[in-house]
Amino acid sequence: MSQKTRYTKSALAVAVALVSTQALSAGFALNEFSASGLGRAYSGEGAIADDPGNVSRNPALIMMFDRPEFSVGGIYIDPDVDISGKSRSGRSTDADNIAPTAWVPNAHFVMPINDQFGVSASVNSNFGLATEYNEHYTAGSVGGKTDLSTMNLNLSGAYRLNNHWSFGLGFDAVYARAKIDRYAGDLGKLVAGSGALPPRLAGPVSQIPDDTKIAHLKGDEWGFGWNAGMLYELDKDNRWGFTYRSEVKVDFDGDYKSELPSAYNQILGNFGLPMGTDGRTVGGSLNLHLPEMWEVSGYNRVAPKWAVHYSMAYTSWSQFKELKAKRHGDTLLYKDESFKDSWRLALGTTYYYNENWTFRTGVAFDDSPVPTNHRSISIPDQDRVWLSAGTTYAFNQDASIDVGASYMHGQHVKVKEDPYEFRSNGKAWLFGTNFNYRF
């Protein structure tokens, strides 16, 4: 295959832009399920039981509560992600603050039934992302607007076997909603100038306006999974937890349309890439696999006022090998993803100052699951380091409030999405608060 043919095929593949691919071409897991966890960089979550939020991580922790308790709150995420680079056309691809701010709410309730059984319920989000480039952005075919949000409803139960062992099992119902818009940018000029199109099409293609919406994909659907956990208590000051969250498959049946003329499809069909719909909406299906996760956690109260906690989480992103969008049995889009499994390591400490005040801090390292050659500017994923701190103030024995903050710093990375090359750097501040009440 000639260099020109390779270039044109990759450019047209981008232009087709059924790019829910871009919603998946990065690690997009969320940890933000409680403010207390945020303050310790989510270290030891499967073994700590200081509020009901921990139970959403490990259902076996239900048996650590001696009366009903609920917690409600949210995490505010303020990212700062910038993109720089140039197109092969010579135009700048610089863009600042491509990721908007967001709130991630949560609510948790735990209720022990007796000394051996208990139940819990929670609402939170385990996955989500959003990036926004303006409609005239040079690389709009790979940037555009991407929005994926999920809501996880969990019901769990737990059983205490003896003074040392407890076990929990839960059911997850996940509602996912995705919306992706992609624009032509300067891609028409690049494709027309490649010499791969016949003269009768090269002229019209080169005149495609930057803000032409070459793809719009929208859909929402439910998926289902389960989670399980166990807790080993050596004594009241030392315990360890093991948790598992299953893969969740979400089968989207959504809408797709493109403002490009369907007259181009015959030429693009030579590349196996249907594209234009003349602005008409057509149906399509897409399978989204949210990966399974294992986590080992520990909590040790090493002094009357001090405790340390730690976690090692393993997410099986390698299950996400490919993305395939279909319509009436025909493949609309196929992309080899080849994600790799990733790790998250976290370490923290808690200081129990007195009956009213508790202070915590933590550090963590997030390993990106996206191989270098699969990075995307819709979410330019990168390894991240967390620095966190937080506190709890107890008004009395029944009511308390948690406050947490984290600074997340990502490494500088290079992103290549033919026919564009980019550089990206990103960081984020996260702030959270939860109100807790015991009945």
Image: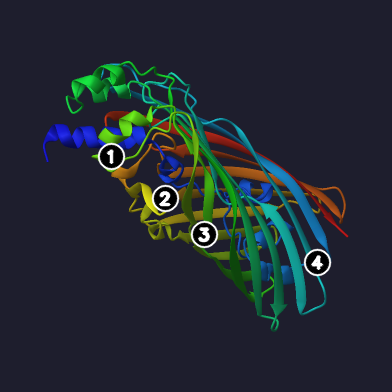
Query: In terms of sequence position, does the residue under pointer 1 or pointer 3 come before the other?
Result: 3
Q: Is residue 370 left or right of residue 354?
A: left
- Count of labels shown? 4
Residue tagged 2? 326
* Residue 159, quarter of the rendered image: bottom right
Specify the amino acid type for callout 3: Lys
Q: Nearest the camera: 393 or 63? A: 63
Of circles 4 and 1, the one toward us is 1
Circle number at residue 111: 4
Residue under the point 33% across and 29% down = 263
Q: Nearest the camera: 413 or 180? A: 180
Query: In terms of sequence position, does the residue under pointer 2 or pointer 4 come before the other?
Result: 4
Residue under the point 38% across and 59% down = 318
Contact flag, marks 3 and 2 (Cβ < 8 Å): no
Query: In terms of sequence position, does the residue under pointer 1 or pointer 2 come before the other?
Result: 1
Q: CA distance from mark 4 to mark 3?
A: 30 Å
The x and y percentages for residue 133 are: 47, 25
**Few, some or many C-alpha atoms within 10 Å of disc 3 (few <14, some 14-19, many ≥20)?**
some
Q: Going by the picture, which residue comes out furthest to the left?
A: 2
Query: In terms of sequence position, does the residue under pointer 4 or pointer 1 come before the other?
Result: 4
Query: In terms of sequence position, does the residue under pointer 4 or pointer 3 come before the other?
Result: 4
Q: Secondary structure at mark 1?
A: helix
Contact flag, marks 1 and 2 (Cβ < 8 Å): no
Q: CA distance from mark 4 to mark 1?
A: 58 Å
Residue tagged 1? 269
The x and y percentages for residue 429 are: 57, 35
Q: Nearest the camera: 204 or 160? A: 204
Q: Secondary structure at mark 2?
A: strand
Taking the image as drawn, is residue 148 in sight?
Answer: yes
Q: CA distance from mark 1 to mark 3?
A: 30 Å
